[in-house]
């Protein structure tokens, strides 16, 4: 026998209903009730799906409107004190203000959820924070609704220690664990309320248990779960993303069961844990990959589970490795994917079905000869035999590239001299990160072209017009290094992937990135090859419109890989090098066509960093190598930029510096330029563009604030190294916000130049 469950579902709805509903709320077309209606509808759909496949426990509490961390804070009453909100009176309007900022307050900081591309809002731990008077009903009402329909329900929440750990100390709070007592009490109030609803299983997610924790945190774990034991509710402690650690601690915790992500552990390692894990307790095995979109080899998994099933019997639970938040919902909505490749895939809905069949088999309800299992085996074998994923041309290129070093020809100092003279750049050169607002009209234009409703020439003309407007605007604003604005790009990864071999695309495979922002990660199924130049024509055209330099704009190898679903039949390292070779050809093409400044965006560079410390060096070395393959050996006059956002660079500056980009533009404004201290400590030698305003918020930065921020930058870093730019592309902003913000940015920059030159 075995019990089946999942950790969590995607939250955006089959057609991104949630995104559109929230945006309508922001535009005042929807009220709070309209939003609640959509909220309930999506929850119901998700629950029904689990019930349809006979999943033993339906998971409730995984749904939220913007971010599950902010939700947890709101439910507990532990929202940032600086907003001055009464925790009892939080409504959706205030909830979104915390995420997006309001007149008086900056938005909460956003950062990546472990090694995923999902961003959570960072809790703010001040000394006087309370875990009291929360919006308990946000969760309790949801539970009531589910209870009225389904019998077996499991409620999920983020664990107190993970919540504490992921937050940021503010004010004079010295140690996050000073808040331990308060947070325990806050959670106990919540747990009691959940129990009162008749719930007896609660899933508490503590992914930090896979990290190497300091002793004080391990002690805290003991304290917390000892206290929770008093509530007398069954706790399934959930870990994911990495190898389980802290075996002895976990063994001693008074919990009902533990969930292990078996995709990122292997059975051998976990064997040691299972030796000490009693069969009187629940062991939940996350055997279906919640992070990729490949069909599971059902028979292989069944064979792996058989032994466990004998030991744990009813106490063996079958699940996904982590929440399905990180993959699209339903493969059935895909009509354009190549038919052969489609048979290799499995999205959230299909993965729930896989869980069902594995658990049915373990319950002896079906045999290995079952039709579904047989069909699964056929597709797994067909993929292995297919010719689709191999390309001889790539193999050849790969061999040549392997041996070389790819260093720039001379030192940064020399390069800089040549570049600044040639492009006549002032101090504090101003630039943009790449994209301009993606208006409805632009989206519609691309849509019409994609669906063959307008011909290529017509489309091209309109795109060129857009670029002209963008260049004119930047000249008028008096920016120094221009961008073309990326109107032809839907998404920075998709755009390149579409023109490369080895990539496949979904039409509806959306995944939440943060809030209402969703991405459609491409699927890398085969060897990557660039058959034709990708950006040459547009870059050449853009440069022809102005005497100022216009940056060629490419997406870097690591980002291309990290923001795609990658192959499960080849090491990621090889895929990344294949991608770098394709980009290298692109860089040469740009250079040949008169493009002098080339930006290679690597916003996913930091995110690729493995959670496991011992694997980091290897990753960083490959990531640097890939960047250098793409643009390393190129003439001194060509100025290479890179851009990274949301990154805390603390430990990886050494490697960023090895990339040897002439300029790096980064996100710094949300953290008030604090990140720059690390660049100073490290003595980073190349140029830096610390983003001087936050493009993720609709707030227009005022001149005085920008001036202050710029002043902060050159207190830390030699002014000659500093570039002035927003902290990321402007595609999520509207034109009005964009123009006003940029005007202020340029004025502030001029004030600074004047002051400094005096
Ligand atoms: C997430 S980083 C985005 C970089 C890209 N060039 C843009 O401006 O949109
Ligand atoms: Zn960015």
Image (spheres, grey):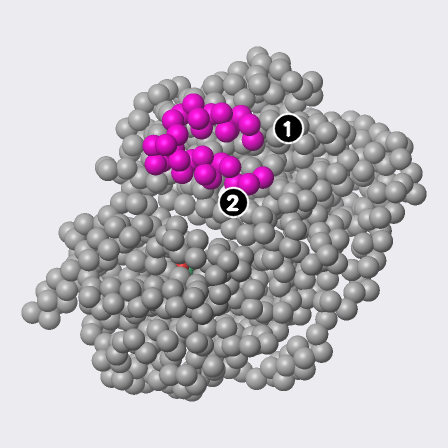
Quadrant for the N terminus in the image: top right
Q: Is residue 660 above or below residue 56?
A: below
Q: Secondary structure under badge 1?
A: helix
Residue position for label 1:
47
Q: Secondary structure under badge 2?
A: strand
Q: Does residue 326 appear left or right of residue 676 in this picture?
A: right
- Taken as a whole, is the magenta stretch helix, strand or loop? helix
> Which of the pair 574/621 is nearer the observer?
574
Q: Position of residue 440 (x, y in %)?
A: 39, 50
Residue in the picture at 75% in, 58% down? 340
Residue in the picture at 64% in, 55% down? 336
Q: Position of residue 385 (x, y in %)?
A: 82, 64
Q: Within the image, what quadrant is residue 63 found in? A: top right
Some atom of ligand 1 lies within 8 Å of the CB belonging to the residue at label 1: no
Residue position for label 2:
512
Q: Is residue 632 above or below residue 755?
A: below
Residue 232 is at least partly visible in this image: no
- The segment highlighted magenta reads 14-42
Q: Position of residue 301 (x, y in %)?
A: 80, 46
Residue 294 is at least partly visible in this image: yes
Q: Earlier in the sequence, mark 2 or mark 1?
A: 1
Per the image, is 204 magenta? no
């Amino acid at each position: 026998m075995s019990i089946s469950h999942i950790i969590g579902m995607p939250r955006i709805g089959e057609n991104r209903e949630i995104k559109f509903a929230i945006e309508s709320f922001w535009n005042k077309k929807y009220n709070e009730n309209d939003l609640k209606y959509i909220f309930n509808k999506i929850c119901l759909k998700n629950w029904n799906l689990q019930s349809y496949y006979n999943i033993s426990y339906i998971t409730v509490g995984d749904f939220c409107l913007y971010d599950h961390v902010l939700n947890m804070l709101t439910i507990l009453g532990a929202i940032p004190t600086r907003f001055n909100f009464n925790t009892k009176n939080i409504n959706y309007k205030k909830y979104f203000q915390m995420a997006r900022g309001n007149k008086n307050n900056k938005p909460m900081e956003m950062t990546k959820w472990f090694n995923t591309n999902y961003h959570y809002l960072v809790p703010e731990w001040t000394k006087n924070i309370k875990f009291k008077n929360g919006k308990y009903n946000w969760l309790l009402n949801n539970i009531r609704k589910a209870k009225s329909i389904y019998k077996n329900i499991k409620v999920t929440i983020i664990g107190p220690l993970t919540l504490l750990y992921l937050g940021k100390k503010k004010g004079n709070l010295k140690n996050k664990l000073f808040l331990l007592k308060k947070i325990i009490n806050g959670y106990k109030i919540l747990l009691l309320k959940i129990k009162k609803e008749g719930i007896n299983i609660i899933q508490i997610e503590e992914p930090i248990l896979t990290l190497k924790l300091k002793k004080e945190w391990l002690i805290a774990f003991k304290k917390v779960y000892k206290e929770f034991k008093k509530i007398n509710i069954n706790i399934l402690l959930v870990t994911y993303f990495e190898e389980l650690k802290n075996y002895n601690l976990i063994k001693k915790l008074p919990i009902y069961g533990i969930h292990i992500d078996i995709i990122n552990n292997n059975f051998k390692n976990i064997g040691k844990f299972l030796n000490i894990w009693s069969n009187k307790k629940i062991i939940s095995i996350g055997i279906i990959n919640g992070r990729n979109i490949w069909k599971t080899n059902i028979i292989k998994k069944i064979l792996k589970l058989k032994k466990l099933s004998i030991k744990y019997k009813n106490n063996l639970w079958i699940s996904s490795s982590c929440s399905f938040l990180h993959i699209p919902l339903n493969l059935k909505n895909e009509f354009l994917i190549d038919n052969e490749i489609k048979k290799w895939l499995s999205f959230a809905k299909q993965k729930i079905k896989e869980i069902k069949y594995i658990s049915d088999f373990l319950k002896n309800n079906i045999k290995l000869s079952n039709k579904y299992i047989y069909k699964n085996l056929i597709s797994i074998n067909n993929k292995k035999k297919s010719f689709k994923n191999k390309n001889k041309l790539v193999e050849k290129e790969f061999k040549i590239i392997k041996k070389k070093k790819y260093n720039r020809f001379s030192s940064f100092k020399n390069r800089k001299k040549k570049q600044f003279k040639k492009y006549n750049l002032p101090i504090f050169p101003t630039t943009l990160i790449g994209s301009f607002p993606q208006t409805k009209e632009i989206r519609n234009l691309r849509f019409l072209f994609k669906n063959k409703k307008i011909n290529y020439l017509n489309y091209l003309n309109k795109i060129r017009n857009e670029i002209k407007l963008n260049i004119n605007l930047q000249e008028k604003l008096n920016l120094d290094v221009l961008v073309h604005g990326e109107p032809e790009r839907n998404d920075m990864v998709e755009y390149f992937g579409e023109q490369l071999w080895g990539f496949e695309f979904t039409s509806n495979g959306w995944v939440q990135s943060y809030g209402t922002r969703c991405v459609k990660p491409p699927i890398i199924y085969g060897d990557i090859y660039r058959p034709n130049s990708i950006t040459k024509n547009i870059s050449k055209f853009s440069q022809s419109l102005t005497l100022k330099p216009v940056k060629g704009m490419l997406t870097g190898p690591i980002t291309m890989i990290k923001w795609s679903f990658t192959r499960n039949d080849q090491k990621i390292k090889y895929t990344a090098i294949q991608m770098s070779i394709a980009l290298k050809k692109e860089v040469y093409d740009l250079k040949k066509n008169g493009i002098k400044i080339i930006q290679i965006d690597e916003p996913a560079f930091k995110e690729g960093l493995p959670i496991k410390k011992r694997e980091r060096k290897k990753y960083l070395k490959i990531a640097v190598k890939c960047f250098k393959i793409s643009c390393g050996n190129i003439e001194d006059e060509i100025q290479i930029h890179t851009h990274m956002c949301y990154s805390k660079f603390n430990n990886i500056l050494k490697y960023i510096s090895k990339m040897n980009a002439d300029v790096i533009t980064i996100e710094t404004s949300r953290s008030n330029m604090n990140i720059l201290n690390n660049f100073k400590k490290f003595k980073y030698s190349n140029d830096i563009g610390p983003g001087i305003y936050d493009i993720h918020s609709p707030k227009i930065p005022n001149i005085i604030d920008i001036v202050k921020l710029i002043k902060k930058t050159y207190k830390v870093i030699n002014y000659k190294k500093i570039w002035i730019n927003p902290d990321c592309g402007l595609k999520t902003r509207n034109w009005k916000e964009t123009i006003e913000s940029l005007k202020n940015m340029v004025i502030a920059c001029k004030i600074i130049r004047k002051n400094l030159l005096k």
